[in-house]
Amino acid sequence: DTEITGFETVPEEDRPPINVVHLSWDVMLGLGTFLLFIAAWFGFVWWRKRDIPKTKWFLRIVAISGVAAVLCMEAGWVLTETGRQPWVVYKVLRTSDAVTSASGIWGSFAIAMAIYAAVISAAVIVIRRMTKRWREVGTSDHDVPYGPPPTDIDLTHSRSTKASS
């Protein structure tokens, strides 16, 4: 004898945008399941062979999984933020009432953006210098402490160049 109330009983002005909420839920759940299957695939191959899978398909999917993880996280954020609309605190504070009228907020925002820009610029400069130093002409990969390990081809090549010089 219990009456089940649905979404239509919520007043129109209190409803979140249901299409955005539903789509972000589907994206988050689908990509999360995709990432779980990748981890299970890796775990199974590691358990059976004690080696990292090296097939082209696995490596392609793993490359995609980084982007999928970010999209999954963003979809979760969209779900959280739009699902609670129009409330910041349910039935206490609406988002339209929570907006600040402080005038100094733009100065703080500009300082934060300047700090982020400086950190990103420094990171790009350091990484570019590292790549130039790492691949200088005349050096081999195994002379660099953070380079890839030498292979037989590299050793033969370096021996033949030393013998010819």
Image (tube, grey):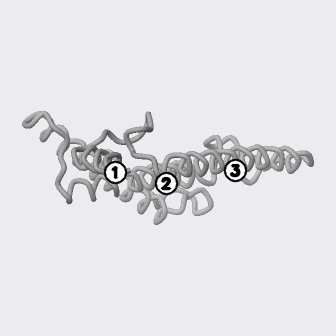
Residue kind at label 1, given as amino acid type: Thr
Q: Label 2 belongs to which residue?
A: 137
Q: Circle 1 — which element?
A: helix
Question: Which disc, if any, is residue 81?
Answer: none
**For the point 24% across and 50% down, which residue is it?**
153
Residue kind at label 2, given as amino acid type: Val
Question: Which disc, if any, is residue 121?
Answer: 3
Q: Residues within 10 Å of mark 1 (few under 14, many from 20)?
A: few
Q: CA distance from mark 3 to mark 1?
A: 39 Å
Q: Are marks 2 and 3 in contact (CB under 8 Å)?
A: no
Q: Nearer the viewer, residue 79 or 117?
A: 117
Q: Label 1 belongs to which residue?
A: 161
* Circle nearer the viewer, 2 or 3: 2
Q: Earlier in the sequence, mark 2 or mark 3?
A: 3
Q: Circle 2 — which element?
A: loop
Q: Nearer the viewer, residue 133 or 32?
A: 133
Q: CA distance from mark 2 to mark 3?
A: 26 Å
Q: Residue furthest left?
A: 48
Q: Residues within 10 Å of mark 2 (few under 14, many from 20)?
A: few
Residue kind at label 3, given as amino acid type: Ser
Q: In x, y percent, where is residue 148? A: 35, 42
Q: Residues within 10 Å of mark 3 (few under 14, many from 20)?
A: few
Using the rendered view, name the quadrant where residue 144 is placed.
top left
